[in-house]
Image (spheres, rainbow, N blue to C red):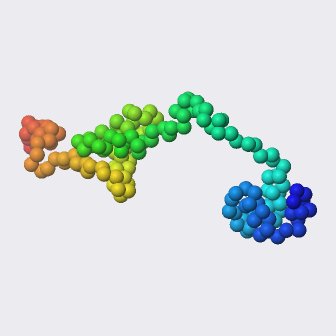
Amino acid sequence: MTTETSYTGMTRTRLAETYNAMAGTELRADSYSKRTWIEMLESMEAEPETPTTEAADDTTDPATEAADEPAPTVKSVVLELAADATLTNRQLAEMAADRLPGSAPTPKSVASILCLARKAGVDVPQRQRPARPRAGDYHPLAAETLLAAETAPELP
């Protein structure tokens, strides 16, 4: 079956079976038109197979191995830093931004990363929200306002 005429008389199902046997794939017959199946089979016959040797696979360059490692992401850095439960989301975001120049994680994005990690089953310690001042707590701005009100002259 090396000529076009041998493929033209075949059904699309038979063409798909022939292609799958030659390519080692499992494509469905309705994936392509009959013309496309014929073109794919002809191109496979036209391309000579190059023998692969294991010796070529054994010689790897250390520089390419280092390049194959994925670059750290904001998620990986945040999850690495999240083991310390004393850090707030704001601190985690700042530290991640320091480690990854060009990234701009926010406390909200850090919280989202940690929440999704917890849902995925990763053991991430809970963060404590920063304490908000309560009604009776001392607040420097409130004290300044009270002092200004006390020292202000009375209006007639």
On screen, residue 123 versus residue 39, left or right, reads left
Location of the C terminus (image quadrant): top left
Any part of residue 145 in sight: no
Residue at 12% x, 50% y is 135
Residue at 86% x, 63% y is 7
On screen, residue 93 versus residue 154, left or right, reads right
114 up-or-down from 26: above or below:
above
- x%, y% of residue 116? 38, 54
- x%, y% of residue 24? 70, 57
Q: Which of 51 and 136 lies nearest the eye of the viewer?
A: 51
Q: Which of 44 and 105 lies nearest the eye of the viewer?
A: 44
- x%, y% of residue 130? 22, 46
Any part of residue 89 in sight: yes
- x%, y% of residue 59? 61, 32
Q: Quadrant of residue 101?
A: top left
Q: Which of 124 and 145 lies nearest the eye of the viewer?
A: 124
Q: Quadrant of residue 10?
A: bottom right
On screen, residue 74 versus residue 140, left or right, reads right
Residue at 90% x, 59% y is 4
Report the label total: 0
Residue at 10% x, 38% y is 147
On screen, residue 65 versus residue 47, left or right, reads left
Location of the N terminus (image quadrant): bottom right
